[in-house]
Amino acid sequence: MNQLHLHLLSDSTGETLEVVAKACLAQFDDVEAIRHFWPMVRSEGHLDRVLDQIERRPGLVLYTLVNSNIRRELEQKCRRRGIHAVSALDPVVDALSAVTGQEAKARPGRQHALDAAYFARVDAIQFTIAHDDGMGWENWEEADIVLAGVSRTSKTPTAIYLANRGYKVANIPLVPESPPPAALFTLRHPLVVGLTTNPDRLIQIRRNRLLALNQAPETDYVDMEAVNRELAFARRLFADNGWPTIDVTRRSIEETAFAIVKLLNERAAA
């Protein structure tokens, strides 16, 4: 296993660097990346203190800096210290500049501006939290998406992921012994999406959940026959109502969310 110290240095929050680093590291096997975050680096004095720390644990510096003086200092001092540094966004920014004929605005953290889209995202997150696990069904018509599925089919994390991208999401667990509210079957605005999974995988996830909660590991919650009945009940409900269904067995939260957004866009274009 190769060990790498990965230094993420930014004049803003460093969120962009974290996403880029994760995507790139996924392309390599047997690499253990130890991430070091250095956000809000906006002065030469701060930069020098950070570089002293980086030199103690040398590796790769991935950076996003828009201030030309700080960038120049970083690049020069990294060269002198024998530290490899790479700007994460330069190729894309240069290409956009060439295509649009505009120069980039050198504003740190501009993607985090408190604009209308930002407040819409905050509103979506608040709505999603308030409508988790079947709550607030009276307001489901205000949602963009409603996720339905049996327990532990990743409804909540998928909903939160979508909310962070500005979608208002409600979710409801499907239980054969407790029919969902009638409002679920009369929704017009939201896209209702059914989430399902492989029973073996579902039992494994549920068993781990019970162990984490120090609860009895052998109940109907993890009984194969009972789980199959739950999944069959959910699938019939999806089919009877014509709701699109996504099997989350081998999907990450991000992949499931992408598939849902694709369905939403297709419906809007229809």
Image (spheres, rainbow, N blue to C red):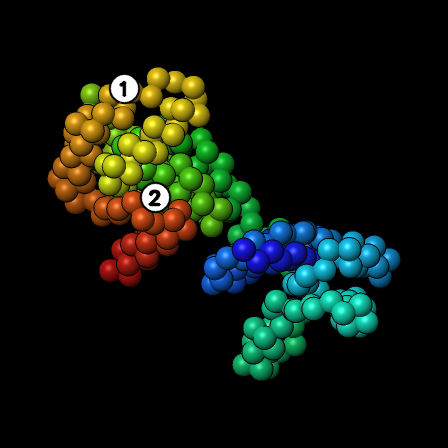
Give the residue furthest to the top. Answer: 216
Query: Label 2, label 1: how many angstroms apart (C-alpha)?
Result: 32 Å
Mark 2 lies on residue = 145
Mark 1 lies on residue = 219
Question: What residue is drawn where x is 62% and y is 72%?
Answer: 90
Kindly indicate the quadrant of the structure image that contains residue 235: top left
Question: What residue is drawn where x is 65% and y is 69%?
Answer: 87
Q: Position of residue 234 (x, y in %)?
A: 20, 35
Q: Nearer the viewer, residue 134 or 58?
A: 58
Q: Nearer the viewer, residue 57 or 115?
A: 57
- 103 versus 253 height, above or below: below
Q: Position of residue 63 (x, y in %)?
A: 67, 63
Give residue 43's mark: none
Give the residue furthest to the right. Answer: 45
Q: Quadrant of the C terminus?
A: bottom left
Residue 262 seen in this snapshot: yes
- 165 versus 180 height, above or below: below
- 66 versus 125 height, above or below: below
Looking at the picture, which amino acid does disc 1 mark? Thr
Residue 237 seen in this snapshot: no
Question: What residue is drawn where x is 60% and y is 56%?
Answer: 3
Total number of numbered labels? 2
Q: Position of residue 211 (x, y in %)?
A: 40, 24
Q: Quadrant of the N terminus?
A: bottom right
